[in-house]
């Protein structure tokens, strides 16, 4: 069965600092990987996705993520964090051939200090 | 843009009541999902539906049922609400047969059972 681990429950960074959120997955085949962001009181918004090809994926809001098969990781990065990036971030892995589709990690809460 | 609309943002009900949460999507998506979101647990799949009148259990179906009479509408039913069902509920939808497609989420319903 597929699974996703986000080892950091809560991360605090200063505005303008760089950010890396960790995600490790377990899946037998080539995974479909997603990062979502959830602002307070809102649903989830897709930041970026990886299916195949270039292992460095660009997303919205200046985010990028790198797929590393050898480490079973799909870490999210941003070179300079803005106060509006404060939110909860979820990594998810998709399974091919299943209508169920996505398994989510437990989330990482990001706090941005002024 | 895909629009997934959940009928209520906030709902307060009493123990033992039958509760209906409604979700409507406007993109002719085959797949629809109900998740429950709790702090530290991420999103857990309750039920999903891959076609009208078709449904499958997710990870935590106990105490819940669903109804999909029309393609655009997916209802979550709490047969006899209990306090441990106090949570945020998220609805999502996507195309069938494309497991690499992202799910589109509603803004959520925060349900309190007193």
Image: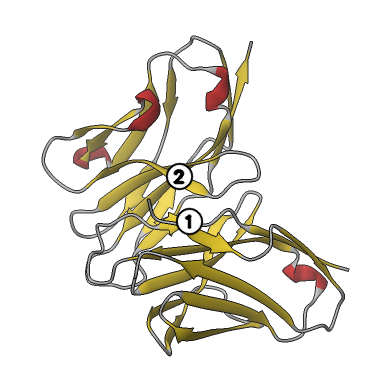
Question: How many marks overall?
Answer: 2
Discs 2, 1: same chain: no
State the image quarter where residue A93 is shown: bottom left
Judge by depth and name the residue closer to the eye, B114 or B26: B26
Q: Indicate the position of residue B59 as horizontal and vertical percent values.
A: 51, 73
How crowded is the residue under tag 2: few (<14 C-alpha within 10 Å), some, or many (20+)? Answer: some
A85 up-or-down from B105: above or below = above
How crowded is the residue under tag 1: few (<14 C-alpha within 10 Å), some, or many (20+)? Answer: many
Query: Do the CB atoms of the residues marked 2 and 1 lie less than 8 Å apart?
Result: yes
For the residue labelled by badge 1, is the local secondary structure a helix, a strand or a loop? strand
Provide the residue designation for mark 2: A45
Q: Indicate the position of residue B76 as horizontal and vertical percent values.
A: 60, 77
A92 up-or-down from B99: above or below = above
Provide the residue designation for mark 1: B105
Left or right of A106? Residue B53 is left
- In this view, the residue farthest toward the left is A53
Q: Indicate the position of residue A30 as horizontal and vertical percent values.
A: 18, 54
Q: Which mark is on residue B19? A: none
Left or right of A97? Residue B27 is right
Q: Indicate the position of residue B31 as horizontal and vertical percent values.
A: 37, 72
The C terminus of chain B: image quadrant: bottom right
State the image quarter where residue B110 is shown: bottom right
**Chain label for disc 1:** B
Q: CA distance from mark 2 to mark 1?
A: 7 Å
Left or right of A37? Residue A64 is left
Judge by depth and name the residue closer to the eye, B28 or A80: B28
A42 up-or-down from B2: above or below = above
**Chain label for disc 2:** A
Left or right of B8? Residue A11 is left
State the image quarter where residue B104 is shown: bottom left
Judge by depth and name the residue closer to the eye, B67 or A113: B67
């Amino acid at each position: 069965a597929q699974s996703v681990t986000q080892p950091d429950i809560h991360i605090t960074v200063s505005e303008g600092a760089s950010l890396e959120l960790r995600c490790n997955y377990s899946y037998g085949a080539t995974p479909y990987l997603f990062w979502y962001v959830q602002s307070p009181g809102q649903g989830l918004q897709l930041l970026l996705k990886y299916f195949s090809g270039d292992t460095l994926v660009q997303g919205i809001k200046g985010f990028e993520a790198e797929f590393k098969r050898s480490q079973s990781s799909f870490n999210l990065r941003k070179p300079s964090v803005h106060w509006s990036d404060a939110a909860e971030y979820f990594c998810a892995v998709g399974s091919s051939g299943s209508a169920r589709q996505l398994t989510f990690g437990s989330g990482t809460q990001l706090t941005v200090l002024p | 843009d895909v629009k997934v609309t959940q009928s209520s943002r906030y709902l307060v009900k009493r123990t033992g009541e039958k509760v209906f949460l409604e979700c409507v999507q406007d993109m002719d998506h085959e797949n629809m999902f109900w998740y429950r979101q709790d702090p530290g647990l991420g999103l857990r799949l309750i039920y999903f539906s891959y076609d009208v009148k078709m449904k499958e259990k997710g990870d935590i179906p106990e105490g819940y049922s669903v109804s999909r009479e029309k393609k655009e509408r997916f209802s979550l039913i709490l047969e006899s609400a209990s306090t441990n069902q106090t949570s945020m509920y998220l609805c999502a939808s996507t195309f069938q047969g494309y497991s690499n497609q992202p799910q589109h989420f509603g803004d959520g319903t925060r349900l309190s059972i007193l």
